[in-house]
Amino acid sequence: MSKVILITGCSSGLGISLAVQAAQAGHTVYATMRNLDKRTALDEAAEAAGVTLNVAQLDVQDSASIATCVEDVLGAQGHVDVLINNAGAGFVRSTEQASEDDINWVMDVNFMGVVRCTKALIAHFRERRAGHVITISSVGGLVGQPFNEIYCAAKFAVEGYMEAMASYISPHFGINFTVVEPGGIASEFAANVMKQVEETGGMLDDEYLPILQKYVGGSQTRQAGSDIYQTADEVAAVVMECVASDAPPIRTRTSKWGEAFCALKTDLDPDGKKLQQQVVDTFLS
Ligand code: NAP
């Protein structure tokens, strides 16, 4: 069935793959980005794939831009079936090294951005008794990692937010919630993190430096030669399975590596459905 799908963060990386694969699957796609001057890569990918996309401006940090975009899509299509919260940004600094502005920014893009976009569509989904919110989290939404405490906290927040809504909105209003938990994705993400570090004073020469160097040095090796990293197309294919499913998971990893890395937390309940039932039984029966 063809669906109307709104995707955030489509100027690069996973967003481009999601938009193209959704259109290839026959869906009507609204591929959004905060800065339309950066649409060339998306346009080229769409042209190479022979698909048509609706490209629109949406900044997840700006409620007015979200409202305008949602209003335009609803005006043109009458409804939205799927929201894919993909926009996000990494951040590698210890708590001691991070400024309060840094921390607010990481939480705002990665967590509040998800809340804002979901809030903009949830009443529409409730009225239709249908809809699917898919949020791109990370294995970092399940497992805390070095120098990533602020980013992981934002992704953990996203996981709790989605899990809580799945506990009562799904059974009562028929809206599905899915968090997708990729490992590494070959995209602009890591380069953007390092750019952000450089722009805010570089690696600080403090007691954390040797640990940070170990982490950053290791991440280059990890990227080059292991199965931690997937292509954006591989991750997008997993998301498309969730879009197509009549009973999508509440959470899913995207690779064997991700599954193994998170197994201590996910083995008992890989798709989150048992926990959902436990919460329903505890609070709503
Ligand atoms: P990416 O290539 O850096 O793409 C991130 C996208 O988010 C870009 O389109 C970026 O737009 C957009 N974005 C940032 N701030 C925004 C804002 N305020 N409003 C709207 N869009 C904004 O990284 P990616 O790997 O494709 O990341 C996609 C998702 O996967 C993110 O949620 C990320 O946390 C998650 N993830 C990534 C990895 C990884 O290793 N790459 C691993 C696990 C999960 P601009 O071009 O304007 O900055």
Image (cartoon, rainbow, N blue to C red):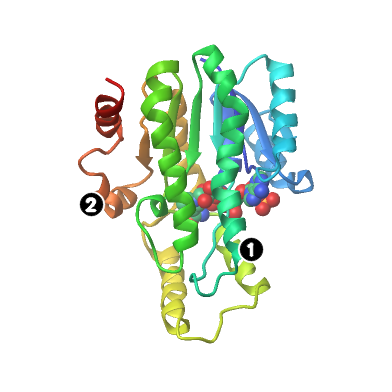
> Which element type, helix, strand or loop, lies under badge 1?
helix
Position in image of residue 12 (x %, y %): 63, 48
Left or right, residue 30 beside residue 35: left
Q: Amino acid at mark 2?
A: Leu
Q: Quadrant of the C terminus?
A: top left
Q: Image point 64% across, 74% down: which residue? A: 198
Front in this rendered view, residue 35 or 277: 277
- Nearest to the eye among marks 1 and 2: give it: 1
In the picture, the disc for residue 264 is 2
Front in this rendered view, residue 283 or 27: 283
In this view, 155 is above or below 94: above
Image-quadrant location for residue 228 = bottom left
Q: Image point 40% across, 66% down: which residue? A: 222
Position in image of residue 70 (x %, y %): 69, 27
Left or right, residue 115 beside residue 223: right
In this view, 93 is above or below 274: below
Front in this rendered view, residue 8 or 219: 8
Image-quadrant location for residue 14 = top right
